[in-house]
Image: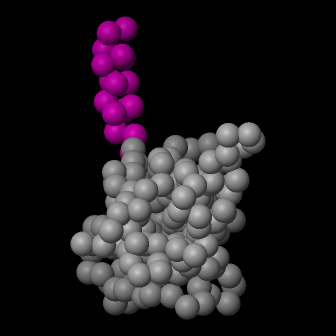
Amino acid sequence: MVLSLGLAVPALAQHPVAEVTLLRFERDGESILLSAVVNFDLPSAVEEALVKGVPMIFVAELELFRERWYWTNKKVMSAQRHMRLAYQPLTRRWRLHVASGVPSAAGLGVSLNQSFETLADAVSAMQRLSRWKIAEVTELDLEQGHQVEFRFKLDLSQLPRPFQIGSLGQSDWNVSAAKAQRFTLEPVK
């Protein structure tokens, strides 16, 4: 009995954990910029699918709420960034497409495309969101208090249908992190 419990503990410790370690907002002229760091390790099932040529789409979402004492907080803005990670077997390179729109059958639309030699480099680029323009200063009443909710996840709905069915209820496919905090603007350094 003791031996079986000893084997179960390391299995639980290997479960990938994602967390948002940095969430900072700064003002640059009339723009509000977000910088964030999300630490996570890719689960082995996701890594295997990537190596076999299945692209994965990760989504960073931000919602900003104005605090109200008389009712629930009011959502004043939201932003999304989609990151499509794929392996190119002919060139043996990793491609990362970053776009602010929702991916469609026609493609990602306007996006930033980057190539990487290793999977670790590509994942490292996804983990750091740097100076992402989320809003204009004129869109917010900075005299009011605001609350921000940030989420980062692997979008399972964008996987091919057989993978969607196979990933249901499996923690191997769970890559998600969230953080909520009070919205404060820092000046540009």
Residue 84 seen? no
> 109 or 64, which lies in front?
64
| Residue extending farthest top | 1
Residue 169 visible somewhere in the drawing: yes
Task: Indicate the colouring scheme.
Answer: one colour
- What secondary structure predominates along the stretch shown in magenta? helix
Q: Residue at x 48, y 65 (%)?
A: 49
> Looking at the image, how many numbered discs can be counted on the residues?
0
Residue 47 in the image: above or below residue 189 = above
Report the front residue among 134 and 42. Answer: 134
Q: Nearer the viewer, residue 62 or 118?
A: 62
| 118 horizontally vs 100: left or right | left
Q: Left or right: where does residue 186 sit relative to residue 137?
A: left
Q: Which residues are magenta?
A: 1-16
Residue 15 location (% of width, % of height):
40, 40
- For the point 38% across and 68% down, the residue is 26
Q: Is residue 28 above or below residue 163?
A: below
Q: Is residue 43 left or right of residue 60?
A: left
For residue 103, which quarter of the picture?
A: bottom right
Locate the N terminus by quadrant. top left
Residue at 62%, 48% in the rendered image: 67
Let me know if residue 23 is in the magenta part: no
Q: Where residue 189 appears, x then y in whole percent? A: 24, 72
* Image location of residue 9, percent across then percent down: 34, 25
Q: Position of residue 71 (x, y in %)?
A: 75, 41
Quadrant of residue 130 within the rendered picture:
bottom left
Query: Image point 62% across, 54% down: which residue?
Result: 65
> Looking at the image, which residue sits at the far front?
143
Magenta region includes residue 10: yes
- Residue in front for this viewpoint, 140 or 80: 140
